[in-house]
Image (cartoon, helix red, strand yellow):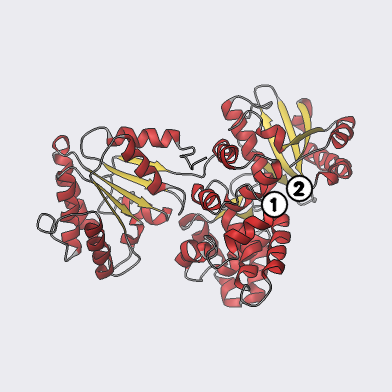
Amino acid sequence: MIWGFYGRAMELQELVDILGRGRWFFARITGRRRIGKTTLVQRALEKVSHNRIFYVQIPDSAPAGVLSAVRDAMDTFGLVDTTYPRPQSLLDLARTVERLAEDGYIVALDEFQYFSRKPLFEFTSHLQARVDALSAKADQVRGGLIVLGSIHADMVALLDDRNAPLFNRITDHLELQHLDISSVLGILDAHADREPERLLFLWNLFEGVPKFYRDAYEQDVLGQDRKAVLSKMYFQSSSPLRTEADNWFLSELRGRYDVVLKYVARHPGCSNGDIESHLREVSTQTAEQAGGYLKNLIERYQMLERRLPVFAKRQARRGRYYLRDNFLRSWLAALQNPVSAINFRPTTFLVDQADERLRDVEGHALEILSSQLYEERSRLGIGDFNLSQRIAGYWDRNDTEIDLVALDEDERIIRFGTCKRNAQRLPADVPVFAGHIERFLKAFPAYRAWNIQRVAIAPRISAEIRSHLTSQGVMAQDLIDLTRDLG
C-alpha cells in the first residue's frame, strides 16, 4: 500500500478554509521539527488546487546567506527575474513578499524563528510595513503569507510580544502536536500490524512524528523486528535517522545543555536536586547555571517539562523533570552512544546494546502511552472511564509511587494504575501497589468514599495473569484492550 496522509484532519480543514477565503492572510504554523508543518501546507494547497506557491527555508545565517537561499528558491520555483528582481537586501526581501502576495502567490517562510537573530531582526520591521499595506487592501489581495517555526519562544517573541514589529499582525495560528494514537494505529494498520509490542517499540522511538514513520516505511522496516528497524534506521551509512537528532534538534542548543538533557533522558522523573548534584560532579560552573538551563529548556525550547503529583499546588517543591519528546529521550538514553561507535565496534553488538537500553526506556514510555490512550478514549467516548481531568501520577516523601491516577468526578470514581513493561512482574506487584494506594488515601481521606478501582497495565497480559489479578481485585488492561476501537 502506498503512503498516505495520516491524521491532521482538523488542522488540514482549517488551513484549507484559510486558503479558500480568496483574500490576504498572514498565518503562523508552529510545531517541533519534522512534525509535518510543510507537508500540511502542501496537502492544503493540493486540496484547493492552488499552484502559485513560493517556499523558502530560512537558514540560520547572516543576511547574505538568507538572501542567497531566497534567490535560489526563486530560481527553483521559476520566478522570472525580470518580473521578480532578486532581492539584494532584507528590505528588498520584504518587498518581494508583498509583490508575490499581490500577484496571488502563497509565500511560505520556513524556520521563520531565525529572524529573531540580531543580524536578521530588521527584516521584521520591513515586513511589518508590507503586511500593513497588504492588510489595508486585504479584499483585493489574493495571496497570503505563511510563516513556519519550530522554536516556540522565538516565534512568540517575533509575533506575540507587544514590542515586536509584527505584534498583532497574524490573522491565523495553527500549532501542530504529535499525531494522536489513532493516527499512529492507522499507519500501522496500513503498513505493518498493531501488535502491542510493535506499537510500544515504534511509539517510543518515533512518538507521533509522521516523518519518522514514513522513513521507516521507505526503508521497508515498519513491519520487521526490532533489530532490523534499529539497524536500518540508525546504524547504516545511509540510515535516515543516524544524524537526525544532532543535526536537527541538538544543533540549535550549540552544546550548552547536553549534560542536563542526557541526565534527564537517562533518569526520567529526576528532581531539581538530582540534576544539580549531577552537574556538580561534572562541573561546578555548570551546576551554578542549572536553574537557567532548566528554564530555557522548558520555556524556550520546550524540550523538558516539570510535572507535579496529582493535586499538588503549582509552587510545590516535589516537581520531577522529563524529556517531552520520545525521539530525543530514546536517542540520548539508548542510541547516541552506540551509533557514535559504529566505526569502532561490530554493528551487531551495537544494535544489541541499543536494543537492550531501549527496553529500559520503554518502561517509562508505557506510562505515557497508557495515559494518552486513556485520554484519547475518553475524548472519543469509547473508553470504560470518563476522565474529568488529565491523568497524573502521584509520589510523596514516604516512597509512595503510583503511575497513574484517573478521576471521574461525575461518578465519583478514582482509578489507580500500575504499569509494567514485563507483565510477569504484575502479580508480585499487587501487594506493593495496594500499599501505595493506602498511603495515598491516608493523605487524601475524602476519596475513601469514592468507588476505588485498581488497574494493572502491560503491553500484553496473558489469560493466566489476568485471572490472578482479577482474584486480587485488580483489573488487567493491556495495549490490545486500550487500542481497541481506535484507528
Q: Please provide percent x and percent y for residue 402.
A: 75, 43
In this rendered view, identify the residue nearer to me: 396 or 21: 21
Residue 319's disc is none
Give the quarter of the image for residue 468: top right
Q: Residue furthest front?
A: 1
Q: Is residue 158 left or right of residue 219?
A: left
Give the quarter of the image for residue 368: top right
Relative vertical location of residue 303 with respect to residue 106 in this rendering, above or below? below
Residue type at the position of mark 1:
Glu
Q: Is residue 184 left or right of residue 430?
A: left
Q: Disc 2 versus disc 1: distance between alpha carbons?
A: 7 Å
Give the quarter of the image for residue 42: top left
Q: Please provide percent x and percent y for residue 184.
A: 57, 41
Callout 1: 10 Å neighbours few (<14), some, many (20+)?
Answer: many
At 34% from the left and 46% from the top, the residue drawn is 28
Residue type at the position of mark 2:
Arg
Q: Contact, CB < 8 Å: mark 2 with mark 1?
A: yes
Relative vertical location of residue 12 with respect to residue 221 in this rendering, above or below? above
Q: Is residue 203 left or right of residue 118?
A: right
Whether residue 108 is visible here, answered yes or no, is: yes
Q: Which residue is mark 2?
A: 421
Position of the C terminus, as image quadrant, is top right
Secondary structure found at label 1: helix
Q: Please provide percent x and percent y for residue 310.
A: 67, 41
At 69% from the left and 52% from the top, the residue drawn is 362
Whether residue 311 is visible here, answered yes or no, is: no
Relative vertical location of residue 440 with respect to residue 222 in this rendering, above or below? above
At 64% from the left and 65% from the top, the residue drawn is 263
Label total for image: 2
Residue 362's disc is 1
Secondary structure found at label 2: loop
